[in-house]
Amino acid sequence: MIRLTIAENREVEDKLVEHITNIWGKLQTLSDSYAVVRKPGDYRENSPEIPEEVELPLKIEIFREMCLYSLNKHMSRVCKWGNEFIPFMRAFNKSRRDVDLDEFEQNLYDVGTALIYLTTSLADLDANPEKELTMDWEAMFAESMVISEGIGAVLADKHGLGCEVLANELQGIFFCYIYYTNSNRRKIC
């Protein structure tokens, strides 16, 4: 048995319960599609590969419904942080135009480009709700996977300070950070 608890700072609205119930049902359908190709005894090992024609449409449908439900919250965060992020990415791209990117920078470029595409698409949808039917949800889902897979590496670089170091470098102020681990002093420049 699985028990799902919903906690809010106010009374939980019926539409939230309906949304989660709907998503839960789609996750069950996705799970059932995995079960169809799983061989007896495989459940303790890694999940088997699911044919993309079965898996992808369900994942895109779940992604789409979650985006549509939380669009207002997404857009408020984009408005809050996007004004800082887009100029940062422009400065980064301009500074690295003619050089090979290292692994951190390539991850940042991939995540940043995907994030800008996704937020631009969601902003377009927010401004024109009737465009929902013509949105390229598969491309938006693919970009969200780039973000999901790459953001951990970006945020972990230089013990969580990679973005700070790069931001300071792009502003012309290059700091060295000193941190301590197990009594060892380390300097990151």
Image: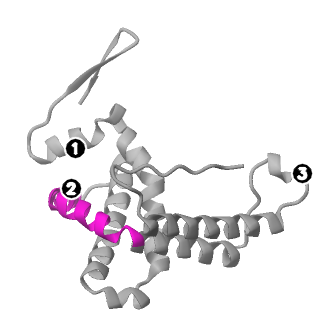
Mark 2, residues whose alpha carbon is within 10 Å: few (<14), some, or many (≥20)? some
The quadrant in which residue 60 appears is: bottom right
Residue 87 is left or right of residue 135, and the answer is: left
Marks 1/3: CA–CA distance: 49 Å
The quadrant in which residue 162 appears is: top left
Residue tagged 2:
92
Residue range of the region highlighted in magenta in the rendering: 69-96
Q: Which mark is residue 82?
A: none
Residue located at (60% from left, 64% from top): 24
Q: Residue furthest front?
A: 11
Residue tagged 3:
41
Pick whichever of labels 1 and 3 is earlier in the sequence.
Answer: 3
Q: In this rendering, is residue 91 above or below 142?
A: above
- In the rendered structure, which amino acid carries the disc numbered 1? Leu
Mark 3 or 2, closer to the camera: 3
Query: Dots 1 and 2: beta carbons under 8 Å?
Result: yes
Mark 1, residues whose alpha carbon is within 10 Å: few (<14), some, or many (≥20)? some
- In the rendered structure, which amino acid carries the disc numbered 2? Phe
Q: In this rendering, is residue 46 above or below 160?
A: below
Mark 3, residues whose alpha carbon is within 10 Å: few (<14), some, or many (≥20)? few
- In the rendered structure, which amino acid carries the disc numbered 3? Gly
Residue located at (83% from left, 61% from top): 38
Where residue 114 sits in the image (x, y, percent)? 36, 66
Where residue 22 sits in the image (x, y, percent)? 56, 70
Residue located at (37% from left, 46% from top): 154
Residue tagged 1:
166
Secondary structure type for disc 3: loop
